[in-house]
């Protein structure tokens, strides 16, 4: 099995009007990976986000705003590097965990998922935290296996896996990106991570977005059970 380094890693994200945080996120990635990781932003912003990203060396793929999942799906399928790491561009995720994620990929895991919930996620709004706990319980029940955080934005994947599965969800894509591989027998690791207070305003309505995520979880789990 190959031993991957940061020269084999692409860090990807969907970006939408994140000029307050994008510089900090990209600086953290550059610092932790010694500038060796490729960075890809799929962007639908109308602020300075893409300009800042390009100045800091990221590859920016412009896209009309079509929702979270459309942007992130394009982002995860864009790189040629064999390890793809997703993150959000709001400075909530700890880039200092990138070496640990890469170590676990090198240990044979196909997906390494950052678990915000087990550490408490105290900076997350209470309603969002309760919703994420509920999503994980619904998914765990339907999957027949315990997961702790279905909607985290920070994960590492083997690139081949991302191209071998057809992704169908938009708002619920984060959950789908964990559930389908887990139910198809790919090797999954969840790593408890700290979660920082976000920079900038959230774009997701907690009620409409929460309902869409719950619907996606049920749909994806049932589809995967039917194909077994």
Image (cartoon, grey):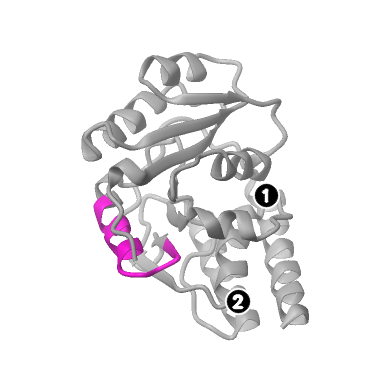
**In what quadrant of the picture does the C terminus appear?**
bottom right
Q: Is residue 102 above or below residue 70?
A: below
Instruction: Tell me, yes or no, if residue 70 can be seen here.
Output: yes
Seen from the viewer's position, the closer of residues 11 and 119 is 11
Seen from the viewer's position, the closer of residues 14 and 210 is 14
Using the rendered view, name the quadrant where residue 177 is placed.
bottom right
State yes or no: residue 109 in magenta. Answer: yes
Q: Residue furthest bottom?
A: 144
**In what quadrant of the picture does the N terminus appear?**
bottom left
Seen from the viewer's position, the closer of residues 1 and 150 is 1
Q: Which residue is located at x 46 percent, y 74 percent?
A: 187
The span shown in magenta is 99-112
Q: Is residue 113 above or below residue 25?
A: below
Instruction: Tell me, yes or no, if residue 17 can be seen here.
Output: no
Q: Secondary structure at mark 1?
A: loop
State yes or no: residue 133 in magenta. Answer: no
Q: Is residue 196 left or right of residue 78?
A: left
Q: Earlier in the sequence, mark 1 or mark 2?
A: 1
Using the rendered view, name the quadrant where residue 166 is placed.
bottom right
Q: Is residue 85 left or right of residue 144?
A: left
Residue 225, label in figure? none
Q: Which residue is located at x 41 percent, y 33 percent?
A: 39
Q: Position of residue 123 (x, y in %)?
A: 37, 50
Q: Which residue is mark 1?
A: 171
Residue 183, label in figure? 2
Q: Residues within 10 Å of mark 1 (few under 14, many from 20)?
A: many
Q: Is residue 213 left or right of residue 6?
A: right
Q: Position of residue 11 (x, y in %)?
A: 41, 41
């Amino acid at each position: 099995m190959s031993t991957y380094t940061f020269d084999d890693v692409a860090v990807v994200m969907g970006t939408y009007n994140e000029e307050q945080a994008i510089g900090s996120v990209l600086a953290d990635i550059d610092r932790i990976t010694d500038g060796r990781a490729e960075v890809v932003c799929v962007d639908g912003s109308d602020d300075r986000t893409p300009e800042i990203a390009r100045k800091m060396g990221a590859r920016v793929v412009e896209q009309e705003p079509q929702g979270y999942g459309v942007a992130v799906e394009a982002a995860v399928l864009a790189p040629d590097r064999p390890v793809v790491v997703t993150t959000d561009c709001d400075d909530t995720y700890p880039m200092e965990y990138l070496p640990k994620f890469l170590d676990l990929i090198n240990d044979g895991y196909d997906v390494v998922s950052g678990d915000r919930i087990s550490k408490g996620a105290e900076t997350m709004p209470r309603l969002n935290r309760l919703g994420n706990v509920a999503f994980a319980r619904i998914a765990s029940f339907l999957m027949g296996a315990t997961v702790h955080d279905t909607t985290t934005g920070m994960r590492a994947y083997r690139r081949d896996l991302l191209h071998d599965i057809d992704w169908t969800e938009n708002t619920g894509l984060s959950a789908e990106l964990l559930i389908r591989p887990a139910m198809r027998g790919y090797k999954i690791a969840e790593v408890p991570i700290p979660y920082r207070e976000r920079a900038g305003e959230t774009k997701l309505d907690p009620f409409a977005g929460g309902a869409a995520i719950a619907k996606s979880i049920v749909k994806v789990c049932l589809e995967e059970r039917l194909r077994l």
